[in-house]
Image: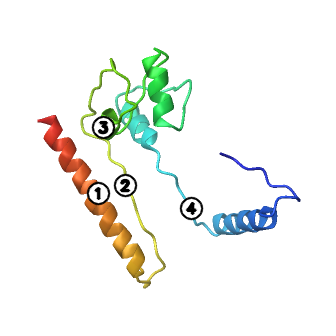
């Protein structure tokens, strides 16, 4: 949800400062790139001489699935979503070959060490991702 800052809004001054800071970072060449799996699809299509032209893009997977179930298009999503309780019945899937993968990164200053809390969080995230992958591998057999 987007939020519009105004003078009356208590975070307005903070939001303006954050935008100035972000602008300063961009001027210095620091980039924050949002992961975009559609870029991987576009690159694969281009290699085959095809150009993808989505007519509508939605952010939320459950909304995308509702649109597909209503016959309004197609979508792509991680296989784990096909096991979600809100996954509509009657949809079919096809896997990408080779599979699409997301890359996650934790970025620090040169020479900086991760805090104990961040290290523990990363261990938990990695363990969870391995468990989900193992479960998906078992269900695919």
Residue at mark 3 to residue at mark 1: CA–CA distance: 15 Å
Disc 2 crowd rating (10 Å Cα; few below 14, some 14-19, many 20+) is few
Dot 3 or dot 1: first in sequence order is 3
Quadrant location of residue 20?
bottom right
Judge whether residue 51 can be spotted in this image: no
CA gap between label 1 and label 2 equals 15 Å
Colour scheme used in the picture? Answer: rainbow
Q: Disc 2 or disc 4, which is closer to the eye?
A: 2
Say what secondary structure mark 1 lies in.
helix
Q: Answer with mark 3 or mark 4, whichever residue precedes in sequence.
A: 4
Q: Position of residue 56 (x, y in %)?
A: 56, 26
For label 2, the residue is: 103
First in residue order: circle 1 vs circle 4: 4
Residue 117 appears in the picture as rendered: yes
Vertical arrangement, residue 79 with respect to residue 31, above or below: above
Q: Residue at x 40, y 36 (%)?
A: 41
Judging by the rendered image, the residue that carries numbered circle 1 is 128
Q: Percent position (x, y) of residue 110?
A: 45, 81
Marks 3/2: CA distance?
16 Å
How many neighbours does mark 4 have within 10 angstroms: few (below 14), some (14-19), or many (20 or more)? Answer: few
């Amino acid at each position: 949800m987007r939020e519009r800052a105004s003078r009356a809004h208590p975070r307005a001054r903070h939001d303006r400062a954050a935008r100035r800071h972000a602008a300063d970072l961009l001027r210095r060449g620091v980039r924050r790139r949002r992961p975009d799996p559609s870029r991987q699809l576009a690159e694969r299509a281009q290699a085959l001489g095809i150009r993808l032209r989505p007519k509508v893009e939605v952010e939320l997977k459950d909304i995308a699935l509702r649109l597909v179930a209503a016959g309004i298009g197609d979508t792509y999503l991680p296989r784990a979503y096909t096991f979600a309780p809100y996954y509509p019945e009657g949809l079919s899937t096809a896997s990408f070959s080779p599979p699409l993968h997301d890359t996650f990164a934790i970025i620090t200053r040169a020479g900086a060490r991760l805090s104990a809390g961040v290290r523990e969080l990363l261990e938990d995230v990695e363990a969870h991702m391995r468990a989900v992958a193992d479960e998906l591998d078992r269900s695919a057999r």
